[in-house]
Amino acid sequence: MDPVQPKNPKAEGITEGSKEPLFKLDEPVTTALNISTLTNVNANEEADSLSFIVLGKDSVEAQASLLASYVDIQQKSMSIDYKSMVSSLSITEMQRRLTEMLQENVKLKETLRQNNDSMKQQFNTLAMWQEEVTKVHQNHKQKFAETKELINHLKKENAELKTKLWLSQHTEDIGYKAISAISESDTIVSNAFTSETELEQNVPKLTSAISKIAVEKCKEYITSVISEKFADKDQQKQQLKVEKELELAMKSLSSSDSHSYVKPEIPKCSEACSAKDQEIACLKKSIDILEQKLQCIFTPVELKDLSETSSNLNRQKFVQNVKQYNDMLQELTECFITQIEHFGSIEKVLKEVTDILRLDGDNSKMQYEEKLCQFCKQLADEQVKLITDRQTLIKSKNQFQKIFSDYNSVLYELEITIDENTKLNVLKANSAHENSQTLEQIKRDQQSLEKEKIIFDQEKDNLEKEKRSLESQKKSLDIDQVSLRDERKLFEQEKITLNEEKVSLDHQSQLYENSERDLQNEKKVLQVRYDQLLSETNNLRQLIEEKSTELQNTMEQVAQGAEEITLLRSQLSLYEEDFQQEKKLAEALLEDKNKLNTELLRQIEFNKQLQESAGITDSSGQPRQTSEHPSGDKYNGRARGRNATVREKQPNYRNLIFRLFPMK
């Protein structure tokens, strides 16, 4: 609602230059007006309380100007000397001034009532806005809790990823456990990919949450600016509904023709069929009720009496309108009959659909789908027909409204004519009675001329009666003065009530300002909260970027580990070949060792034989002994040299083995 524009009732009532009233005299000014206005206000408060009002600068300025006007009125009322005015004015002027003051009082009451209504509406809008702000605040709290949960979940995922990466980096067993390490690295990579996908999925959630918060803030400001108060007539609403239904029906027909038919789900179709059956039953009941009403009420009007008595142009027009109304009634009955037939066809179609849905044969599915397509088209056609029937019903409704208006106008004309006829008869009777009275008065006048004395006496009596009437008028004037004094007291009381209402309005304005301050403080708190949420979202984005960089680094390390594994595999193959070659060499050395041992045994036996032969020769002579000892020494030296070579070869073999297997 727009704010009430301030008006100065003093300026409207009496101009300063001429001091002439701008209102009509002899208007009924009573407290019944105030009672009727209050009842109207109480009746309209419930309808207006549902509307949404936006407060602006104009309303505040209007309130300030109204308060200023009240102050001006109070100053003017204090500056006037009422005693001097009452003593200088006559009775007629007093009456005129009192009527003006009462009219001004009524206008002041109306302005105060309007201001009270506007203040109440504004207070209600403030309460509604406060409730909406609390709701939005609660929604923000819920979303903040959701964001906290998401952050904790992301932190847990990050900790798991860090542990997995640490395990992947500190794998020490590379030899025969390389296959297990490869499998573990593959699992780590897969987990890293899954975690990355989860993070990528969480990022749009966070962005959507942030966007929702921003959208809700925008909605708050938009709802505080936009006012939803539109009043349309019932006929326009019905026409718009009919047009929308026609468009929807045409769209459904075009979509059913252009797009391919989608297979309906059996339970959904069964539920829809049951709902349609219920609607059809309700429509049948309503149709039966309407048919009964048509049979009882809308019977065709007989036109014989009217055609016989109609002689004027108005009667002819009335007859033509009644004929049109009868035609419309016949069209309505035909429409209802066709509607009943349509509903019968719809029932048949729905029964067939239910039978089709109950059957579960696989071979006849295509046939059922074709039948369902046909039934859908038939239903769309029936919807179009229903819309056209609704249009005809609306037209007929308008015609019936015209019928009732014509009927009321005809009744009013008939009543007027009856009243005029009665008045004419009364006037004729009065004129005849007056004529008879005039004749009698002429006769009496003739007699009165003869009796002048009696006439003078009558005149004397008339003068006395006039004197009495003047005295009665004087008494009535005294009573009027007393009533004027009482009205003046009432006016003063009303003035006191106005001052009290002014104080209440000031208190309400203070409350309004305090509530406005509170709302502004809440707005600032919400803005700070919004900035904090934005900073937290930015920090989350930075954390996500850092985690993505860490994931890239881990992927690079995993790739390097795979390359190292391939190199180690090649080294293992080379070591295996070297080991086999050295194994062959060791086997050859063992064979040589065995051969040398056999030769040593042979030499030992040979030496023993030589010693034995040498012992035999000792008995023959010493020179033979000296010649044979060097040979023995030679053989011993050779044997010792061979053993030394064997002993020297054995450590080399051990060194080779330790070189081949340094890990063990």
Image (cartoon, rainbow, N blue to C red):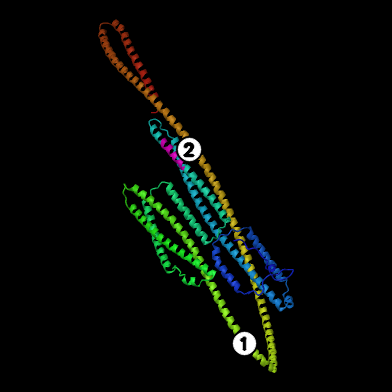
For the residue pair 469 and 42, the one nearer the viewer reads as 469
Left or right position of 5 against 568: right
Q: In this view, does 563 lie above or below 634?
A: below
SS at badge 2: helix
Query: Which residue is under mark 1?
Result: 437
- Quick one: 135 or 486, which is closer to the camera? 486
Q: In this view, does 648 lie above or below 536?
A: above
Q: Quadrant of the C terminus?
A: top left
Name the secondary structure under disc 1. Answer: helix
Observer-nearest of 174 and 9: 9
The answer to which of marks 2 and 1 sits earlier in the sequence is: 1
* 241 vs 48, nearest the viewer: 241
The image quadrant of residue 585 is top left
* Tag 1: amino acid: Gln
Residue at image location 34% in from the left, 16% down from the top? 643
Name which quarter of the figure residue 652 lies in.
top left
Residue 405 visible? The answer is no
Q: Can residue 618 be seen in this view?
A: yes
Residue at the (49%, 67%) spot, across then down: 322
Is residue 11 highlighted in magenta? no
State the separation of the CA atoms marked 2 and 1.
126 Å
- Residue type at mark 2 is Leu
**Residue 279 at x, y = what percent?**
40, 59
Q: Which mark is residue 336?
A: none
Looking at the rendering, the stretch of residues picked out in magenta corresponds to 185-198
Which residue is pictured at 41% across the width and 65% down the height?
291
Image coords of residue 294 (percent x, y): 43, 66
Q: Nearer the viewer, mark 2 or mark 1?
A: 1
Kindly identify which residue carries mark 2.
551
Rendering coords of residue 483 (x, y %):
66, 80
Magenta: predominant secondary structure element? helix
Name above or below for residue 166 compared with residue 614: below
